[in-house]
């Protein structure tokens, strides 16, 4: 198969590129998906009409963990990209109740790219969640926002 960056990056009028479609189908053979992922970092960061990258779309389409991990490994920067509603891959991973392995991978790459206050590193095999890790910061923020919503709904 002749796979070029130009072909993978091509998008239709709604912004779907080849990777969006490959993940939408859900049954794209893994060797073909792996080839598509290796051709273009740009395609992995491209957003469709509502701002979803191929990684965000993989969550929305309920792709298997193996495929999501392939996308994350092919382009770790994709874990930082928000859609038009401000939703990140971490949000989608929690919303769609994805595995702990997926969440750990997302948080690992977020930490690696953004850093964490105090320079604390994440040990992927650790079950400890402290407020100094990206996981702790995530859940602290989540709790704070949930408390705001609850306070507004009581009014």
Image (cartoon, helix red, strand yellow):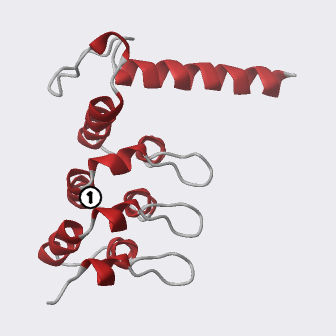
Question: Quadrant where the C terminus lies?
Answer: top right
Residue drawn 22% across the image and 74% down it: 36
> Quick one: 45 or 19, which is closer to the camera?
45
Please state which of residues 92 and 88 is positioned toward the viewer in this rendering: 88
Q: Which image quarter holds the N terminus?
A: bottom left
Q: Is residue 36 left or right of residue 47?
A: left
**Residue located 34% across and 64% down the image:** 42
Question: Residue pushed farthest right?
Answer: 155
Q: Is residue 32 left or right of residue 154?
A: left
x and y percentages locating residue 59 in the rendered image: 40, 57
Label count reads 1
Residue at image coords 42%, 47%? 89
Image point (31%, 81%), residue name: 6
Q: Position of residue 97 (x, y in %)?
A: 40, 44
Q: Residue furthest bottom?
A: 1
The 10 Å Cα crowd at callout 1, few under 14, some 14 to 19, many 20 or more, is: many
**74 left or right of 56?**
left
Location of mark 1 (residue):
71
Q: Is residue 100 visible?
A: yes
Secondary structure state at the residue bearing disc 1:
helix
Q: Position of residue 3 (x, y in %)?
A: 20, 84
Residue 110 percent across, percent down from the top left: 34, 35
Residue 120 in the image: above or below residue 47? above
Relative to 79, residue 132 above or below: above
Residue 63 showing in the rendered view? no
């Amino acid at each position: 198969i002749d796979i070029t960056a130009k072909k993978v990056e091509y998008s239709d009028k709604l912004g779907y590129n080849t990777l969006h479609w490959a993940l939408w189908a859900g049954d794209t053979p893994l060797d073909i998906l792996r080839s598509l992922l290796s051709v273009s970092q740009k395609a992995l960061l491209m957003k469709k009409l509502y701002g979803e990258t191929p990684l965000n779309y993989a969550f929305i389409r309920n792709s298997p963990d193996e495929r999501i991990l392939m996308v994350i490994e092919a382009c770790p920067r994709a874990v930082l990209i928000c859609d038009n509603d401000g939703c990140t891959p971490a949000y989608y991973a929690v919303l769609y109740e994805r595995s702990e392995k997926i969440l750990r991978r997302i948080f690992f790459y977020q930490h690696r790219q953004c850093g964490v206050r105090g320079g604390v590193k994440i040990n992927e095999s650790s079950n400890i969640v402290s407020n100094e890790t990206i996981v702790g910061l995530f859940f602290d923020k989540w709790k704070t926002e949930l408390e705001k919503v609850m306070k507004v709904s009581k009014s």
